[in-house]
Amino acid sequence: MKKIVLTFGLISGLIMAALMTVLLAFVDKIGFDKGVIVGYTTIILGFMLVFFGIRSYRENVGNGQITFARAFAVGILITLIACVFYVVSWEIIYFKFMPDFGDKYASYEIEKARTAGATPQAIEAKAKEMKDLNAMLKNPFINAAMTFTEPFPVGLVITVISAAILRKNKRGAATRDEPQPASLAP
């Protein structure tokens, strides 16, 4: 199980980290709103490996059979590895290459509120909110926790769906693949 979980978790994490890096290179051009949509799309693409990891485990380790609980365990471990990889990648990108990301995001949110016709009090409240957020992002532990909450719920949903689709136990396999033995009547 370790090899499958590590392999699919690392590949999933690499996909998400690579696509996040590419996205961040273009976020100024596409904007933060579209960036969120593209970002979550890349997270979903990365987590597609959860499905394939569970299926690989079922076929190679479980001899074509897997319970929902085992499938969920395999999937959630892949998800956790991918999430940790995603968080570590973001921490490196944020603190080494984009320390001004929080300021850019704050400016964007304040300008968005201003162009939407917000009152001066609402704009001031948004500015304070963004200042507090930026201060939290400067703390690596809070930044990591906040970053973890981006991909994990998506991975959890994909894990549950994949485990439900791929579960196959002896009884279920026999009813689908093999004819049932005739019952002996007294």
Image (cartoon, rainbow, N blue to C red):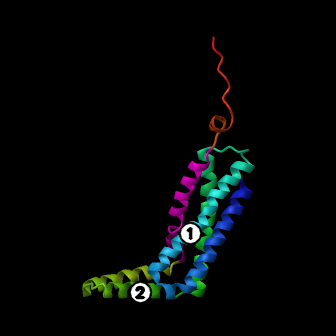
Q: Secondary structure at mark 2?
A: helix
Residue at the (69%, 49%) spot, across then down: 58
What's the mark number on residue 149? none
**Total number of numbered discs in the rendering:** 2
Q: Residue furthest top?
A: 186
The image shows residue 79 at horizontal and vertical percentages of 60, 61
Element at label 1: helix
Q: Residue at x 53, y 68 (%)?
A: 148
Q: Nearer the viewer, residue 48 or 21?
A: 48
Identify residue type, mark 2. Answer: Tyr
Q: Main secondary structure of the magenta part?
A: helix
**In the visual, does 33 lie left or right of 184?**
left
Q: Nearer the viewer, residue 112 or 110?
A: 112
Q: Residue at x 66, y 22 (%)?
A: 182
Q: Quadrant of residue 24?
A: bottom right
In the figure, is residue 141 to the left or right of 74? left
Vertical relation: 184 (above or below) 164: above
Q: Which residue is mark 1?
A: 43
Instruction: Give yes or no for residue 156 being in the magenta stretch.
Output: yes
User: Relative to 158, does residue 10 appear above or below in the rendering?
Assistant: below
| Mark 1: amino acid | Ile
Quarter placement of the C terminus: top right
Q: Which mark is residue 108?
A: 2
Q: Position of residue 17 (x, y in %)?
A: 62, 74
| Residue 49 position within the rendered picture, expressed as x and y whole percent measured from the top left | 64, 62
Magenta residues, start to end: 140-167
- Alpha carbon distance from label 2 to label 1: 23 Å
